[in-house]
Amino acid sequence: MKLQTKIPLEKRSNNLINYKSNIVLLGSCFSENIAKKLDYFKFQNLQNPFGILFHPRAIETLISNAVINKEYSEEEVFFHNEQWHCFDAHSKLSNALKENLIQALNSKLSLTSAVIQNSTHIIITLGTAWVYRDVKTNSIVANCHKVPQKQFKKELLSVEDITNSLKNILSLIRRVNNNAFVVFTVSPIRHTKDGFVENTQSKAHLITAIHKVISNQSFYFPSYEILMDELRDYRFYKDDMIHPNQLAINYIWEKFKTVWISDASFRTMDEVDTIQKGLQHKPFNSKSQAHQEFLQKLEAKKNQLHVQFPHIVF
C-alpha cells in the first residue's frame, strides 16, 4: 500500500558537496534550516550575512553590493524605535548605535564578497514574490523594520521581474566566480499573512521564474514540492500550522543530502555526528573512570578529524 506520492530525485553525478566545498546560503528562513544541518555536520558555509532575505530583489541587492564592493554611509541608515536600521538588511543587524550598524553592514558585505568569490556552491532560497516599495525613494526594501505601513506600497513581482532579477544574480556571481554551482529552491513556508490565494500566486511566480533561468551550472531543488506533495499532513508542521517542524526539516535534509552531498562524505558525517552526540552526553558521574576514558576517546576522534579537515573544530 502506498501512503505517499514520491518525488523522483537522482543523485548528481558530479560537482557534489564535500568537506572541501565552500557553501553560501542566502534567502528565506528555510535556508537557515539547511545551514543549521551543514553547521552540525561541520561543512564550510556562510549563511545569510545580512540576515533573512525573503524575496529575490533583496538577494540581488546584497550580491550586487558585495560584487561592486559598496560601502554603506550614514545616509543609508535610519533611526526608528530606538534602533538604527538599514532597509537592505534584516533587523538582526540593527543596532542602538549608528556607527556600529554601518560598521557591521560593511564588514558583512566585505565578507560576502570574499566568500562568493571562493564559493563552490551557492544555495538561494526564495520565500515570496511580494515586496514593499518605499514611497519616498521608490526602492524595494528587504525589511520594513516596523516602519508605518503608509510609507510603503505592497507589490507582487511579476514572473518577468523575478526572471530578470535571477538573471542578474547569476550574472553578478559569474563576474567574480565562474565555477560556483547555484542551487535555487523555494521555501515551503507559506506566507499566509499575504492571503492563501496570494501565497499560491507568489510561489507560482517564483517557481516559474527559476525554471526560466536554470542551466548547466544552476539547478532547482524541490524543497517546496517535497513538503507540499510528499508530506501532505499537518503532523509535519509546527503548532502554527505554517512552518515545517523538525521532522519535516530532517526529511527534506535527507533528500537534499541524497542529491547534493557526495557519498564519500557520509562516513565523515557519521563521525561528526558521533562526536556531536558525545559532546551532548550528560554523565551520571563526571569524575568516574569510565567517563574520563570516554572523554579521552572523544578528544582523540576530534583531533583525528581536525588533522584530516583543519576547518572542523568542535
Image (cartoon, rainbow, N blue to C red):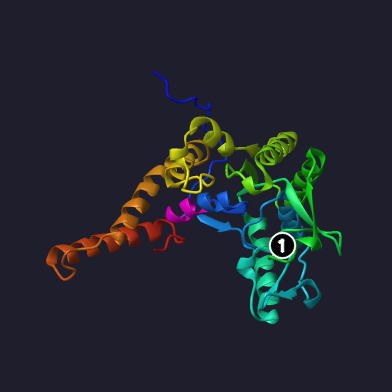
Amino acid type at circle 1 is: Cys
List x then y, in percent, for residue 232. 50, 32
Q: Is residue 134 left or right of residue 313?
A: right
Near-viewer residue (19 or 80): 80
Label 1, secondary structure: give it: loop
List x then y, in percent, for residue 176. 73, 55
Q: Residue furthest top?
A: 1
- Whether 56 is drawn above or below 147: the answer is above
Q: In the image, is residue 225 part of the stretch drawn in magenta?
A: no
- Whether 231 is drawn above or below 68: the answer is above
Q: Is residue 309 visible?
A: yes
Question: In this picture, which residue range is highlighted in magenta?
Answer: 35-42
Task: Please identify the quadrant where the C terminus is shown.
Answer: bottom left
Quadrant in which residue 164 is drawn: top right
Q: Residue at x 57, y 50 (%)?
A: 31
Near-viewer residue (169 or 262): 169
Quadrant in which residue 285 is drawn: bottom left
Q: Is residue 291 left or right of residue 154?
A: left
Q: Residue at x 40, y 43 (%)?
A: 266
Dominant secondary structure, magenta: helix
Task: Please identify the quadrant where the N terminus is shown.
Answer: top left
Q: Residue at x 34, y 57 (%)?
A: 276
Q: Which residue is mark 1?
A: 144
